[in-house]
Amino acid sequence: MKIVRFIIGVAFFGAYINTTQAQSDTAPSLPPSGQLCISCHGAQGQGMEPLGPRLAGLSTEYLVKQISDFQAGHRLNATMQPMAMVLQGESVSQVAAYFSAQTVPVVTAELRGQHVTFTDTAARLAYQGDWARELPACVTCHGPSGLGGGLFPRLAGQQASYIKTQLQAWQAGTRKGDVDGMMASVANKLTIAEIDALANYFANLK
Ligand code: HEC
Ligand code: HEC
């Protein structure tokens, strides 16, 4: 059941990337309610470490989902929850569309088949996972080089400190809302050393 869903997700990557490229001609503008966001996420949603993570290049549907997860208390964060509450009605999708359309560096996707062996712990977990622990490869869902698509967020070039706090939030149970608990199940199998290694690995893909 779950596997089928991943495959469907992955199969949609191609279509998703084409749509976002086609949309860039009619870039949405930032509605007044979104002015507040740029003080921590940057005017182009590029992120301002440690104030706020990068939002640029994440899909509109993913951003809308996260804002409603903060509003519903599925994501517990003292800074971001009150910010999400400011957005109501149409402004949620308008702000999400604005940040989604902001450009992110182009990263050439590396496919699993290009690697014969992995010497680096993080690269091995990212591309092969660890079947002894039933830990799937990160790229199965997050795409080659963690480029993301749809409801699977891009990890490539995201801040290392933010990737780390999210994996720890799933372990602590302060981030929920992931369908079927798929990320909680992944995060709970990782050691702190692996979390650090993965956070640096994906942050450096830029
Ligand atoms: C005072 C700083 C601050 C402001 C202002 C702010 N944010 Fe955030 N935002 C954060 C922090 C910190 C996080 C990380 C929260 C966590 O660790 O769960 C975050 C996370 C997010 C995420 C999750 C990103 C992801 O990759 O899942 C979204 C979406 C988001 N913010 C949207 C917004 C929007 C839209 C606004 C404006 C209405 C806004 N933020 C205003 C600090 C801020
Ligand atoms: C079974 C599919 C799946 C696998 C495998 C997977 N992820 Fe995820 N991941 C997701 C989904 C779905 C989300 C978004 C969850 C949500 O909506 O809150 C996510 C979110 C994340 C986030 C939060 C990003 C953000 O912008 O807030 C991080 C960090 C992350 N994953 C890291 C990893 C790492 C590292 C691995 C490999 C060890 C991994 N994931 C494997 C499905 C997966």
Image (spheres, helix red, strand yellow):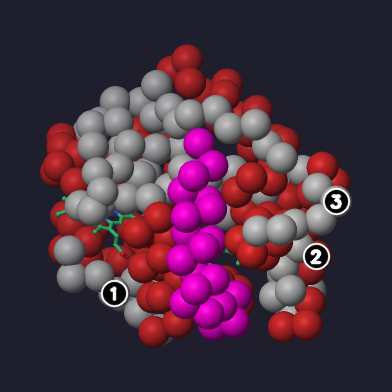
Q: Position of residue 154 (x, y in %)?
A: 53, 47
**Going 20% across and 52% down the picture, which residue do you hit?**
51
Q: Earlier in the sequence, mark 2 or mark 1?
A: 2
Front label number (2 vs 1): 1
Q: The magenta stretch spans which residues?
A: 186-206
Outermost residue to the top: 25
Image-based side of 15 in relation to 36, left or right: right
Q: Main secondary structure of the magenta part?
A: helix
**Going 47% across and 77% down the picture, which residue do you hit?**
192
Residue occupied by mark 3: 116
Disc 2, SS: helix
Residue occupied by mark 2: 4
Ligand 2 is found in the corner quadrant, namely: bottom right
Q: Mark 1: which amino acid?
A: Leu
In this view of the protein, can residue 54 be seen by the observer?
yes
Q: Position of residue 7 (x, y in %)?
A: 78, 57
Q: Nearer the viewer, residue 141 or 129?
A: 129
Quick check: is the Cβ at mark 1 less than 8 Å away from ligand 1?
A: yes
Disc 3 to disc 1, C-alpha distance: 40 Å
Residue occupied by mark 1: 76
Q: Position of residue 56 (x, y in %)?
A: 39, 38
Query: For the residue carrying disc 3, how many other residues have a C-alpha within 10 Å: few (<14), some (14-19), or many (20+)?
Result: few
